[in-house]
Amino acid sequence: MNKTKLCCFTVNTTHACIIANNYISNNLDNVKIIYINEKNETKKVKSIISKFYKRIEERMYYSEWLNENMLNNYEEEEFVFVVHGNEKFVSNVNAFLAINNFNGYIINCYDIVDIRSRIEDVISNHDYYMNTSEVISTKEYKEEKRKQA
């Protein structure tokens, strides 16, 4: 099963939702979106999506934690898991997702206030790094950092 991992660093749930949903609405079609948030902010996420992302509202699912009943057809559907929280929470969710077979994307939105690792180390464990203005491959990110050094 093919999984693409992206990461970003955010200040709150709204910021995480905007970065992830911009990527999803501009780059992906026919995906089942599942939100996994450390904090129970279902109402906030649904409100942001209904106001700004009408196109993906129908494909949106939300969970504080992963609910097995939502994953009804692993092999035929493509999933996007948007994971938001502190570094430990994101790591625990990713460990769970790693043992499940599915095609799709994992967008890890790390709470920047609670990052314990070096940013470069976190980025290097993903295929892509994204922020509010761009999405770049980890390889490109490392090359750019080398040029700046």
Image (spheres, helix red, strand yellow):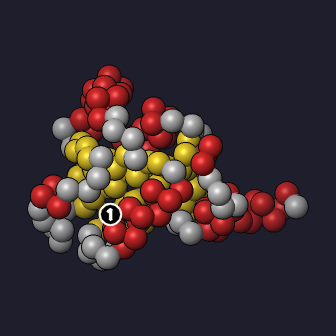
- Say what amino acid the circle numbered 1 marks: Gly
Residue 110: x percent and y percent? 53, 50
Q: Is residue 133 visible?
A: yes
Q: How many marks?
A: 1
Q: Is residue 81 left or right of residue 69?
A: right
Secondary structure at numbered mark 1 = strand
In the image, farthest residue toward the top: 51
Q: Quadrant of residue 42?
A: top left
**In the image, what residue occupies the spot 42% across and 64% down?**
92
Question: In front here: 149 or 86?
Answer: 86
The vertical placement of 125 against 56, above or below, is: below
**In the image, what residue occupies the spot 20% across and 56% down?**
67
> In this figure, which residue is indicated by the disc labeled 1?
104
Residue 136: x percent and y percent? 59, 56
The vertical placement of 52 against 117, above or below, is: above
Residue 135: x percent and y percent? 56, 51
Question: In front here: 7 or 65?
Answer: 65
Figure quadrant of the N terminus: bottom left
Q: Is residue 144 left or right of residue 148?
A: left
Residue 139: x percent and y percent? 64, 68
